[in-house]
Amino acid sequence: MREVVAATFLSLDGVMQAPGGPEEDRAGGFALGGWSVNYWDDMMGKSMDTAFDKPFDLLLGRKTYDIFASYWPFQDADNPVTVRFNAVTKYVATKSNAPLKWQKSVKLEGDAARAVAELKKGEGPTLLLQGSGDFIQTLLAADLIDRFDLMIFPVLLGRGKRLFADGTVPGALKLVSSRTSTTGVTLVSYLRDGAVVPGSFAGPEPSPEEKKRREAMKVGG
């Protein structure tokens, strides 16, 4: 069984759009592209290097694929990330028939969620999601993401594509690691941990005023 991991840069208010540069993704009039750049430090870089040292294949939406394919194949061959990204298989969710020119790129045929579910059943390394905000929504709605590796930046963006948008399947998460960079970026990793179990801080017997409040809520819908 292969694990799907969403490795995502995230603002404090949940936006993941265009962390790397102004021209990365201007969809919806987003004008704050590159919001993660000035928070980078050595610890974050080492964390990324460690993550990429483990076996993985890439799982990408078409927009992120095109960004990566126009960048990584043209970087210095002594860059370890370049070497790894060029070497791994790139599974791409796309409706376009335009060719996937980057070496070892494979189109996910048919329904993208069903294709990923089939990949998960097989043998192989982790399926690592990078960027791919629209594709992530498809996988969240199908409950196919097993782990979230998040870098949460101390910045509020107000608008933009969000990681946990409408359609996310409810579920509990288990924190398995947490660190903070010198610039205030929180690096956290969460695993799926079953269903949400609701509870209540209210006492066993509601007060008369609480009973009235509940009745008013029923009447008001």
Image (cartoon, helix red, strand yellow):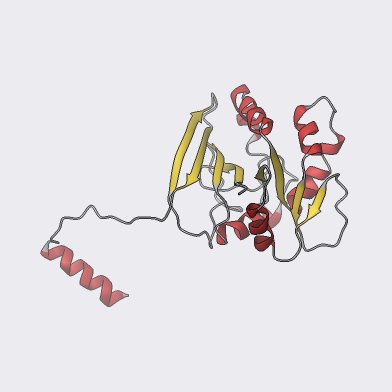
The residue lying toward the viewer, choosing from 179 and 219, is 179
Question: Which residue extends farthest front?
Answer: 123
Q: Residue at x 77, y 47 (%)?
A: 90
- Residue 73 left/right relative to 88: right
Q: Is residue 19 above or below residue 119?
A: above
Count of numbered circles on the image: 0
Q: Is residue 45 above or below residue 101?
A: above
Measured as percent of width and height from the top left, residue 177 is found at: 48, 33
The residue lying toward the viewer, choosing from 118 and 57, is 118
Measured as percent of width and height from the top left, residue 46 is found at: 63, 25
Residue 112, by quadrant, is bottom right
Q: Residue at x 49, y 44 (%)?
A: 191
Q: Quadrant of the C terminus?
A: bottom left
Question: Which residue extends farthest bottom?
Answer: 219
Q: Is residue 42 above or below residue 128?
A: above
Residue 78, by quadrant, is top right
The residue lying toward the viewer, choosing from 80 and 187, is 80
Measured as percent of width and height from the top left, residue 28 is found at: 67, 57
Q: Residue at x 67, y 28 (%)?
A: 49
Measured as percent of width and height from the top left, residue 218 is found at: 27, 74
